[in-house]
Image (cartoon, rainbow, N blue to C red):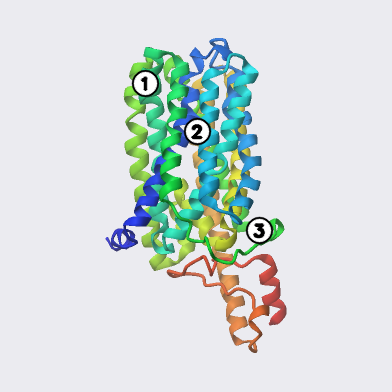
Amino acid sequence: MASIRDFFAEGPYPLWVLALLVTAYLLNQLDRYTLAITSKEMVPLGGNGTGFRYQILAGPVFTLVYTLAGLPVGYIADRFNRVRIFVAAILVWSAATAAMGAADTYWQLVLARAGQGMGQAGCNPIANGLIAEYFAPSTRGTALGIYQWGIYTGYSLSFGAAGPISARYGYRWVYYAFGLAGVPIAAAIYATTIALSEGKPPAKPSLWTVLTFFARPSLLLLCLAGAIRNSAGYVWAFNTEIFFENVHGLSKVDIAKYMSVIPLVGGSLGALLGGIIADRIIKKRGMAARIWVLAWVGITLAVVSDLIPGHMRIVATSIYFFIISNIAGLAPLLVPVLQSHFHSLRTALFILYPCAYAASALLFLVTFVSLQRDVRAAAAAAALADRAPAQPPSSTPASTIPEGNVDSERTPLLPSPADASVNNAGS
């Protein structure tokens, strides 16, 4: 397959960087979801790992800090050494993970969980920016699909490793071990990873300039659809163990046997195939066609990368995660509400998991229609600009190319609303 050949043609060093980023993301997800496996044993939760206080820890405590910290981290990473910021983020969330194991009171656990969210806020935006630097648009979907292996590998390991460690040494050692694992990963990234943007004159767009891109209906719809889909994932991830224990009566050992394999195999294959298919589709139908495979979160990030200029991509990715995570992070609070109303955990999870995925699929379809309209408008504006008298380079708005293997570091799929108004005025 041409897309796979193109991917490996990027060279060994980009593949090494990608492997490090996948490993960091694995640890990110492992640390984040360990709470769902150990909650019933944790002293600060008093043995009640299924109640409202648990759902607050799983959702809002983490998510609000995660999203609020993500904006300044993304803004700083677009201006300074993003590799060092990434390393610092790993060390912060690793230390917070270890602190969760040491917590003796609920409020200590809240503070440690918030620290975990603060550190992990730097992971996805910076990793997405580094991948966009090392991989061309024609292979970026595949690279981001492989990056998403971190989700499924980390989530699977949280079942496969946290349970046995907790059973033998106690739940605290789960957090100590997982926190310590971040140190060698951070060291390897610091020692061997170079940001390609280093040494280049930094473009410094204002936050308002970046926000203007999100005034586009297509990007707003993309964020809403992604938020609903992520809501389903959050709800299921933090209630999987509870569901199988309480509804089906399975033991932790039996749950670990299934959940350490199914997400790893099914999720990783889905992420990889989704990226390969998306990269092949854009060669024939343009970048907007990535929407057709948006069942995979990695492809969502590829679309955001396609739409946003390279010098503002990290902060734009932070804004995207700010929107979707604030909505998704509150979703777990609906579980006890719906469970109480229907007197059934199964019904609550059915509404918030498969039904939410179906709703997001419909919204992605609407997003595709809106994006196609925006692309046609951008192409028309570019054609008018080409026919207009030549302008000095400093006053010429960035051109917009609707499809093809174009490096979106220079040519985003959509112009900003300000650029579009300049084009219209010039015509």
Q: Label 3 vs label 2: CA separation?
A: 32 Å
Position of residue 206 measured from the top left corner of the image (x, y, whole percent): 70, 59
Instruction: Look at the image and tell me whether residue 379 can be seen.
Output: yes
Q: Residue at x 61, y 46 (%)?
A: 73
Q: Amino acid at mark 1?
A: Ile
Crowd rating for badge 3 (residues with CA inside 10 Å; few <14, some 14–19, many 20+): some
Question: Considering only order in the chain, which callout, 1 or 3, is on the residue closer to the N terminus?
Answer: 3
Foreground: disc 2 or disc 1: 1
Dot 1 falls on a residue whose secondary structure is: helix
Q: Which residue is mark 3?
A: 210
Position of residue 231 measured from the top left corner of the image (x, y, whole percent): 55, 36
Task: Tell me the quarter of the image containing the N terminus.
Answer: bottom left
Q: Which residue is mark 1?
A: 255
Which of the 4 quarters of the picture holds residue 328? top right
Position of residue 91 measured from the top left corner of the image (x, y, whole percent): 52, 36
Q: Amino acid at mark 2?
A: Tyr
Cβ–Cβ under 8 Å for marks 3 and 1: no
Placement of 409 over or under 128, stated as above or below: below
Q: Which residue is mark 2?
A: 353
Between residue 31 and residue 144, name the one nearer to us. 31
- 142 on left or right of 419: left
Which of the 4 quarters of the picture holds residue 168? top left
